[in-house]
Amino acid sequence: MRFEEEVDPESVDLSSFVSHETLDRKVWNSDEKLDPAVRDRLLQIAQEFYDKLGIKAEIKDITLTGSLANYNWSKFSDLDTHIIIDFDDVDENTELVRDLMQQTKSNWNRKHNIMVKGYEVELYVQDERDPHFSSGVYSLLNDEWVTKPRREDKEIDREAVKQKAASTMDMIDDVQKLFDEGDYDGAMEYGEKVRDKIKRFRSSGLEREGEYSFENLAFKVLRRNDYLERLSKLRVDAYDSQMSMTQQ
């Protein structure tokens, strides 16, 4: 299924993808230790979130990762805070646990808009066996680096990022067109397909080249220009419209 393409790859803005000389000094001290007040607040938020889950699994670690634990931070960055547990400690059906953690995380992040030093806090519950491809990971519990980032002037394949982002934006626009035409079944089905495609290409890029892969950077473009949020809302709205009944 394809509608006429509308997004010009050259219109995709990559100006925020730069490597800085230092970690963000709003968050990090000059000795590259996390600001104590930031650390304490993130630990408090993570613990309160976890307590509300009502599960008994031991917290193995609470980490800060993502671009704010690296040199490629920007105004779009989040404080990506990961609570590390063993999913087997919750239930032997780890895929069910993963789905529950994902849904709980999504609900929490939608309901809350907690800002620390100007950055939004994003929470995630991670299985201790999950591979993690970030080149910067900081233990909030131990107040030390798990993986300390190195500043590198990575050569970004900007054309590949633009092409991948633009083509995916076209697909999300197609979901919108199906919804606007009243084809809620089609919007639901295609919206799920596009979501799965985005997950697959990001995962593939992270495995192959890490966070600087063109697929992962295209994903960040989609998040920063609100296309991911738009896709998520379209899927919900299509389902609601599909299930609704008009009054007779």
Image (cartoon, rainbow, N blue to C red):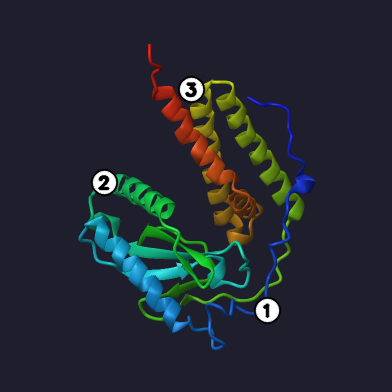
Residue 176: assigned label: none
Pointers 3 and 2 in contact (C-beta within 8 Å): no
Q: Can residue 83 be seen in this view?
A: yes
46 or 193, nearer to the observer: 46
Q: Where is residue 76 in the image (x, y as percent from the top left)?
A: 60, 61
Residue placed farthest to the bottom in the image? 31
Q: What secondary structure is marked by label 3? A: helix
Q: Quadrant of residue 9?
A: top right
Distance from the alpha carbon under mark 3 to that under mark 2: 30 Å
Q: Earlier in the sequence, mark 1 or mark 3?
A: 1
* Residue 90 location (% of width, % of height): 23, 54
Q: Which of marks 1 and 2 is in front?
A: 1
| Left or right: where 131 falls relative to 128 | right
Classed neighbour count for the residue bearing mark 2: other residues with Cα under 10 Å, few (<14), some (14–19), many (≥20): few
**Label 1, label 3: how far apart the Cα atoms are:** 49 Å
Q: Mark 2 points at which residue?
A: 93
Side of 156 relative to 141 (left or right): right
Q: Quick one: label 3 or label 2, which is nearer the N terminus?
A: 2
Res 242 → quadrant: top left
Q: Mark 3 points at which residue?
A: 185
Q: Residue at label 1?
A: 21
> Label 3: few (<14), some or many (≥20) within 10 Å?
some
Residue type pointed to by label 3: Asp
- Where does residue 220 sit, x and y in percent of width and height? 60, 54
